[in-house]
Amino acid sequence: MHVKKFWIGFNLLVLILAGCAGKRTQKEYTKNNSNKQVNMNTDTAILAGGCFWCLDAVYRQMEGIISIECGYANGKIKNPTYKEVCSGLTGHAEVTQLVFDTEKTNYAEILTVFWKIHDPTTLNRQGNDIGTQYRSGIYYRNDAQKDIALKSRDAAVEAKLWEDPIVTEIVPLECYYPAEEYHQDYYTNNPDQPYCVAVVGEKAAKFRKLFADKLKK
């Protein structure tokens, strides 16, 4: 009887451990798979342009964008918290991860919006948001994205979209971690929050004005 109980208990423990081993946090999954396409008709862009609430609100309006996630990229520690990133000591940038339908839009079009919707000429700053976490950045996932990003920047310079030099960093994506749940789709969930009214809402409105042809149907 004792032997039977032992094996029942042992088998139960094995099942529990197997279940635990199979679980992965969302942060681990997203980081390890951030370089993979969801399917053959999608691709992913990761951009930094100041507070991630702004780019989140802007690109949610764009045709072809399937999903958006606010997160942190290219810093020195794993699974950073918002408080840690805001200290400016982790090296992470606030970013938005965009999954898009390549049959409805493309990486170049997304970057065309990027150059006009934020100020790429201010180093580690967007408006009153100051710190390395608010830097302007394009974090490419492959050589094709790198080439498009560099050509897009050169076109923005040639078109003289901004009077001052563009300081946006264009570098490989080294790491990515999703931000806390309350940061996701923040503008939609908090439209009356003062920062949303004064800053995020204005950028969302600017997109509608400049890119009416790119609005979701």
Image (spheres, rainbow, N blue to C red):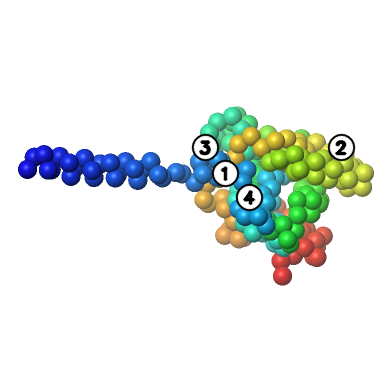
How packed mark 3 is, by other alpha carbons closer than 10 Å (few <14, some 14-19, many 20 or more), is some
Q: How far from the left and from the top, in percent, is residue 136?
A: 74, 40
Label located before the other in sequence (1 or 3):
1
Quarter location, residue 65: bottom right
Contact (Cβ within 8 Å) of mark 1 with mark 4: no
Residue designated by label 3:
79
Q: Secondary structure at mark 2?
A: loop
Mark 4 and mark 2 lie on one chain; the one further toward the N terminus is: 4
Q: Residues within 10 Å of mark 2 (few under 14, many from 20)?
A: few
The spot of residue 173 in percent (x, y) is: 66, 37
Which residue type carries mark 2? Pro
Mark 4: secondary structure: loop
Q: Earlier in the sequence, mark 2 or mark 3?
A: 3
Q: Secondary structure at mark 3?
A: loop
Q: Which residue is mark 4?
A: 37
**CA separation in Å, label 1 and label 3:** 15 Å
Sequence-wise, the earlier of marks 3 and 4 is 4
Task: Give the foreground label among 1 and 3.
Answer: 1
Q: Amino acid at mark 4?
A: Gln
For the question of whether residue 120 can be seen, the reply is no
Residue 196, image x, y percentages: 65, 55
**Lower sequence index among marks 2 and 1:** 1
Tell me if residue 7 can be seen: yes
Circle 1 is placed at which residue position? 33
Who's the residue at 49% across and 46% down the image?
A: 26
Identity of the residue drawn at 64% across and 59% down? 66
Q: Amino acid at mark 3?
A: Asn
Residue 165 numbered tag: 2
Residue 197: image quadrant is bottom right
Location of the C terminus by quadrant is bottom right
Query: Do tag 3 and tag 4 residues touch (Cβ < 8 Å)?
Result: no
